[in-house]
Image (cartoon, coloured by chain):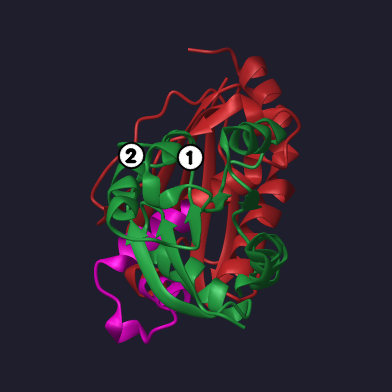
Amino acid sequence: MNSIRALIVDDSSVMRKIVERSLRQAGIELSQVLEAGNGAEALGVLREHRVDLVLCDINMPVMDGLEFVKQLATVENAKGVPVVMITTEGSETHVVQALSCGARGYIRKPFTADQVKEHVVPILGGKS
Amino acid sequence: MKPVNELLAASSRHEHWTPLLEVAVREVFELMLACQLAKPEPVESPSLNVTAMVGLAGRMCGVLSFRCDARSATLMASKMLGVAPDKVGHEMADGLGEICNMIAGNFKNKINGMGDGCMLSVPTVITGSDYSVYSQADSPPVEVRLLFEGLPILISLQIHS
């Protein structure tokens, strides 16, 4: 099993820690965890670092998660990197919107490590 | 001022949301903090001096507030972070804000049509108890009182129709 580099994007530092812990509890080996507090910061991180997975909130100041996913294609390093949204916005419309913007998965808060595993592991394929 | 019969009608309209709000709160604590909440014995209102608030706008307008004391808020953040309570610093407010945000989101997603039609604000956290809240709510709040690790918490939804 390979270990992966993940970027966790959420305006709450506590939530970023919870997401990281859930990834580890889901059995996903992490070689590096990068963090960003909003979409604009995340784009900056991705211009400097290559990652294998992005987990991203939707409601954030400065740049929200949907705009971040739309702009991801402009970052050379991030092309093809899967994004999974983790958010309190749980309606079908939000899910469709996120997936049509380019997200590969959608997890509603509150969530369990099992749900993270269920949504993230298939997206990673053989990477983890 | 609204007539009493209008207030009573609004009150009964939202009364059935109390169990939904309680389920939303319990789910957040079970899934994110791995703990069960208990029902409190009827006692005098304790001093709850940390308040997190999330605004709702759209099909449902109002404010969801989550109140507890500083000891509970620190314990909640420590459980969320997986660290000892004495290691919790500024994360206390961040953690409480996130709990309030998740309760608000979880609650609105349980009501038909609200998931799409109701937006949440980012949370605000106030510490201290020397303040007053002015609300334009036109009905009594939907309230849930529970115990977290034996300590009281109060969740209140004030709705403006």
Instruction: Give residue B41's quadrant in the image.
Output: bottom right
Mark 2 lies on residue:
A61
Q: Is residue A105 left or right of residue A55?
A: right
Mark 1 lies on residue:
A69
Q: Chain of mark 1?
A: A
Q: Colour of chain B?
A: red
Residue found at the very far front of the displayed protein: A76
Q: Which residues are magenta?
A: B74-100
Give the crowd class for mark 1: few <14, some 14-19, many >=20 residues within 10 Å. many
Answer yes or no: is residue A127 visible.
yes
The residue under the point 58% across, 28% down is B118
Residues marked 2 and 1, same chain: yes
Q: Chain of mark 2?
A: A
The quadrant the N terminus of chain A occupies is bottom right
The quadrant the C terminus of chain A occupies is bottom right
Q: Position of residue B73 (x, y in %)?
A: 39, 68
Q: Position of residue B123 (x, y in %)?
A: 38, 45
Q: Position of residue B130 (x, y in %)?
A: 23, 50
Does dot 2 land on a helix, a strand or a loop? loop
Between B8 and A29, the one nearer to me in the picture: A29
Task: Kindly report the secondary structure that dominates the magenta region of the rendered protein.
Answer: helix
Mark 2 or mark 1: whose residue is earlier in sequence: 2
Q: How many marks?
A: 2
Question: The chain shown in green is which?
Answer: A
Give the crowd class for mark 2: few <14, some 14-19, many >=20 residues within 10 Å. some
Q: Is residue B80 magenta?
A: yes
B66 shown above or below A75: below
